[in-house]
Image (spheres, rainbow, N blue to C red):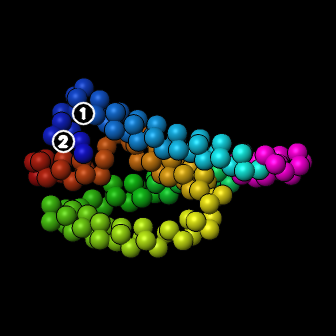
Amino acid sequence: MVGTTWYRRGPRYWLRRVVVSGFSLLVMTLVFVALLVWFHDLVSGMPSGWRAGCEVAYGAVCAAAGVWGWVRGRRQLAAALAAPATTAEETWRRHDSAQRSVPGRASAGRLPALLLAPLIAPLFAWLLGTLLAASLVRELPAEVRARRALSPS
């Protein structure tokens, strides 16, 4: 994802990191805002007291989910930085095992997503928190392994 510019960390490296992270954050934020508008339209027919209560509760759930995603993302990043893959084979093994489990997770998540449609915005808040936690770091876990491999022992 970051190419070969990581070891110099020149302008091309930072531009690529900003563009990739910024675009991902922009798309996720737009989807999140669209889901919030959808929820607002969903509860607009309720009496004003109930509507306000639902919107406040929904906002609190979204905020809590965003913080939870941030904390989880930072913990995963810290674990990856503390124990980076030592060889290219180990990196590919980790990558392949993560990729194999993705289709099963996607299929298993469809029915609960349909049943819990009003909670999709908090899910996106959680994803935004996780993405922000991974984007706002100075050094990626893959760079740690590569830097250790290139440094003279």
* Residue 133 drawn at (x, y percent): 46, 47
Predominant secondary structure in magenta?
Answer: helix
Residue found farthest to the front: 45
Q: Amino acid at mark 2?
A: Gly
Mark 2 lies on a secondary structure that is: loop
Under circle 1, the secondary element is helix
Q: Nearer the viewer, residue 51 or 141?
A: 51
126 or 10: nearer the eye? 126
Q: How many marks?
A: 2
Q: Which segment did they paint magenta?
A: 44-59
Q: Is residue 80 visible?
A: yes
Percent across and percent down for residue 61 are: 68, 54
Q: Which residue is mark 1?
A: 13
Which residue is drawn at the image coordinates 82% and 48% (left, top)? 45
Left or right position of 119 against 40? left
For the residues bearing labels 2 and 1, Cβ distance under 8 angstroms: yes
Query: Upstream in the sequence, badge 2 or badge 1?
Result: 2
The residue positioned 24% from the left and 67% from the top of the image is 96
Residue 149 coordinates in the image, percent (x, y):
14, 52
Residue 91: give x, y in percent of width and height. Answer: 21, 62
Density class for disc 2 (Cα within 10 Å; few <14, some 14-19, many ≥20) is: few
Is residue 60 covered in magenta? no
Give the side of residue 142 with respect to residue 131, left or right: left
The kind of residue tagged 1 is Tyr
Q: Which residue: 59% across, 56% down? A: 120
- Above/below status of 96 relative to 2: below
Residue, disc 2: 3
Front-most of residues 31 and 58: 31
Q: Is 92 situated above or below 33?
A: below
Q: Which disc is residue 122 wearing?
A: none
Spatial CA distance of label 2 from label 1 is 8 Å
Front-most of residues 38 and 59? 38
